[in-house]
Image (spheres, helix red, strand yellow):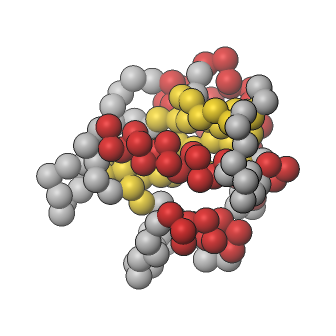
Amino acid sequence: MTEHPALEVRPLQASDKADWSRLWAAYLAFYETSRPQEIHDLYFERLMGDDPQDFSGLVAVLDGRLVGLTHYLFHRHGWSVENVCYLQDLYADPDVRGMGIGRALIEAVYAAADAAGAPNVYWLTQDSNATARRLYDRIGTLTPFVKYNRT
């Protein structure tokens, strides 16, 4: 992995909507799903909102082009006084993988959590996502928890 000196991670802006939508659609396609345009619009609206309990978004910009995104949320946790941070989505364009985009986005979420006084950041991925898991194993701790959904 190499770091690219022209990489910038910054908050998502309203003017990023078209590029964000392209990246988020590619992220969903990676997980073999899609969402209707109504959900794209609602999610972006939430990301642009100012409710501290709603999602926040960051984007990675490389040479002036949006190449990655992450979304995160602070919420209460029954085992701590402080909020915790859930990193919901993380995606980098395939043509820039291995350039430190994912790491930079995760570290930016870590910094946002630190600034908000949230000592824990957690996320989920598919067990088969080997490429991402190599990064996650370097910057996080794998837990023994198994996720269930309502049937």
In the rendered image, the residue lying farthest to the left is 81
Please tell me which residue lies in front, 36 or 117. 117
**Quadrant housing residue 19:** top right
Left/right of residue 81 with respect to residue 140 in the rendered view: left
Question: 141 above or below 46?
Answer: below
Q: Residue 93 location in percent, x, y? A: 78, 47
| Residue shown at the point (40%, 39%) measured from the top left | 112
Question: 133 above or below 95?
Answer: below
| Residue shown at the point (29%, 38%) measured from the top left | 116
Question: 72 above or below 52?
Answer: below
**Quadrant housing residue 121:** bottom left
Task: Kindly tell me whether residue 58 is visible in this rendering.
Answer: yes
In the rendered image, the residue lying farthest to the right is 95
Please tell me which residue lies in front, 151 or 37. 37
| Residue shown at the point (50%, 63%) measured from the top left | 139
Question: 37 above or below 122?
Answer: above
| Residue shown at the point (42%, 60%) measured from the top left | 122
Q: Quadrant of the N terminus?
A: bottom right
Q: Residue 29 location in percent, x, y? A: 76, 54
Task: Kindly tell me whether residue 36 is visible in this rendering.
Answer: no
In the rendered image, the residue lying farthest to the top is 15
The mark total stands at 0
Left/right of residue 16 with respect to residue 111 in the rendered view: right
Left/right of residue 3 with respect to residue 50 in the rendered view: right
Q: Residue 51 location in percent, x, y? A: 35, 27
